[in-house]
Amino acid sequence: MKNGSMYSMIIVEGNKTMQEELTEYFNETGEFEVVAVAGDGLEALERIERLQPKVVVFDIVLGSIDGFELLERVQKMSVKPKMIALSSLSQEGFAAKALSLGASYYMMKPVKNEVLHKRIKEFCDEDSSISSTTLIKLKVRTLDEKLSNIFITVGIPAHIKGYQFLREAIKMAIDNPEIINSITKQLYPSIAGRFETSASKVERAIRHAIEVAWNRGKIENINNLFGIKVYNSNEKPTNGEFIALVADKMLIEGFGH
């Protein structure tokens, strides 16, 4: 539901002060209309179903049903809003769970209203008629965020070298899917050149990143992410298989040129 050029929003927040601050801020942007607020999960669910907003900003910790169950129920709706999770729960597992259940984004409290506004606007504008240059910039930014979310979900930590190498490899495979057939001769050397290292170190670092994910036992998250049972705990993909799997998912979601 839109009012002119404004995006409709529902804020789901148990803290009354924060609920009021967010409502006032977004109503004053001229880009969003807060059509409802809710203090608990069931109240939120009823209002989302009835009002069909473009975006829902919600806390994970809620009364009646929590944010995770809210996400599960929203995913069963025919019209799904963008779900932006705000939470003071910092454990990696909470973010991974929210993202695997369909959250568009997970942000830690406290968050500046301006940053939240910018991020939500980018997600909403992806569905709008905007210039091709702006769309490309947004896609690059949201692709990086999407890959970060995938890595969180499958259990690849950001501090290891393979994280960055794997990100570059997937982006290259999205731009040129054929490169996956020349992973040793083209892909590894190209990444090595960008990071001033050797192709063999790139290969080992990516392999280590995948091993870390498998050793963390997050196979269920991986299968949920791709929507099918791709692997079990005894089946670890090769570097090329994992890169191709994620790249294909991104292409299906429209991140290719």
Image (cartoon, helix red, strand yellow):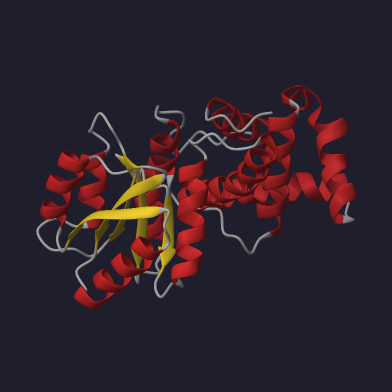
As drawn, the residue found furthest toward the front would be 4
On the rendered image, what quadrant is the N terminus found in?
top left
Q: Is 65 rendered above or below residue 170?
A: below
Q: Decide if residue 67 is on the left or right side of residue 96.
A: left
Residue 73: give x, y in percent of width and height. Answer: 20, 41
Q: Decide if residue 45 is on the left or right side of residue 225.
A: left
| Image point (37%, 47%), residue name | 7
| Image point (51%, 59%), residue name | 118
Residue 32: give x, y in percent of width and height. Answer: 37, 54
151 and 46: which one is in front?
A: 46
Image quadrant where residue 18 sits: bottom left
Q: Decide if residue 73 is on the left or right side of residue 57.
A: left
Q: Is 164 rendered above or below residue 86?
A: above
Quick check: can you spot residue 90? yes
129 and 91: which one is in front?
A: 129
| Image point (75%, 48%), residue name | 204
On the rendered image, what quadrant is the C terminus found in?
top right
| Image point (26%, 46%), residue name | 71
Quick check: can you spot residue 214? no
Residue 153: give x, y in percent of width and height. Answer: 46, 49
100 and 105: which one is in front?
A: 105
Residue 229: give x, y in percent of width and height. Answer: 40, 28
